[in-house]
Each structure stands twice: as C-alpha cells, then as structure tokens.
Image (tube, grey):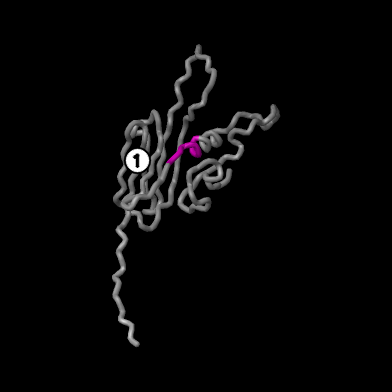
Amino acid sequence: MSLVPSSLFGGRRTNVFDPFSLDVWDPFQDFPFPSTALAAPRSEVAKETSAFASTRIDWKETPEAHVFKADLPGLKKEEVRVEIEEGKVLQISGERSKEKEEKNDKWHRIERSSGKFLRRFRLPENAKADQVKASMENGVLTVTVPKEEVKKADVKSIEISG
C-alpha cells in the first residue's frame, strides 16, 4: 500500500503534490494473479482498503468556504460520520452493509463495494473548524467548512521627497 497522489490515477486534483489530501492507493487491487499461492482470496484488510480508497470526494474552495462533496448512494445520514480531529483534519467515514445472501441465490456479478470507508483531509489554516456544517441529500454528502475572512492590510501612502 502506498500514499500516492490521486491525480496520477484519474483524480481531478490540479496539484500533484497537494499536501491536503491523504489518499491510499492499493497497487494490486485489480491485478489478475495467476492460479498460484498469490491467487488466494483477498484479505479483509485489502477489501477495506479498496472501499476506503474508492470513496470519491470532491473538494472546492469558494471565497467563503471549503466545500466537500461525497457520493454515498444507498447510505442514510445515520450511517455516515463527519468529524474534526485536533481542529485540523476533516474525517468522513461510514460503512456500507453487505446484502444478505440466501442459500438459493446465484450471483453472476458483484461490483458494488461494501464495508467501511474512511477519508481524511488536512484543513488549511484559514478553515473555521468549529463552524463545520454537513448535510445529506439524494445520496450526496456535502460538508461546508467556512473560511476566516482575510484582513486587508492597511495601506498608507508615503510621500516621496526629493
């Protein structure tokens, strides 16, 4: 497992070295191992890492706030947690439950992810972490972190003598 900028693999980030996003990338997630000892079923940690890394979140900055949007289809707001750690890190987590399997069911394809997910973002200095608001509508979580107003420096004209 490596910490890798998501922009290298299809993310929308404009800066490859963005220090605010903490993405985890599993380089072996979809690698087709031959039928050897390596072909063993993926561990629970690998499955959780896959769900963890696949939760896509957009982050935009407006003049008033930092806005995070996450697509979380099928989840209720009670199944999602939004937390601020140490006043600096926004953490979004939750869990998708597996669908119950019946004995007579025959699965042809399983593509939807299940399990726990977790994303963390280091907030910039201008974020008002004590005024964070979150809402969920139609499977989209929106987290708004207001920004501190930038004080304009007093400009004083100085007369040039000479």
- Residue 126 drawn above or below residue 4: below
Q: Residue furthest bottom?
A: 162
User: Percent from the top left, x then y, of residue 150?
Assistant: 32, 61
In the rendering, at what x and y percent does residue 105 appear?
A: 50, 14
The residue drawn where x is 30% and y is 45% is: 133
Amino acid under label 1? Thr
Secondary structure found at label 1: strand
- Badge 1 crowding class, 10 Å Cα cut-off, few under 14, some 14 to 19, many 20 or more, is some
Which corner quadrant of the image does residue 108 belong to? Answer: top right
From the viewer's perspective, is 83 left or right of 98? left
Residue 77 falls within the magenta-colored stretch: no
In this figure, which residue is indicated by the disc labeled 1? Answer: 142
Q: Is residue 88 left or right of residue 112?
A: left
Q: How many marks?
A: 1
Give the residues drawn in magenta, as a range.
Answer: 51-57
Which residue is at a point 56% across and 45% down the rendered structure image? 8
In the shown orientation, is residue 51 left or right of residue 126?
A: right
Compared to residue 154, the image places residue 78 above or below, namely above
Residue 67 or residue 91, whichever sits in front:
67
Q: Quadrant of residue 9?
A: top right
**Is residue 66 or residue 55 the one in the foreground?**
66
Q: Quadrant of residue 148?
A: bottom left
Of the 4 image quadrants, the one containing the N terminus is: top right
| Residue occupying image coordinates x 58% and y 35% | 29
Front residue of this view, candidates 124 and 151: 151
Percent of width and height locating residue 46: 56, 36
Image quadrant occupied by the C terminus? bottom left
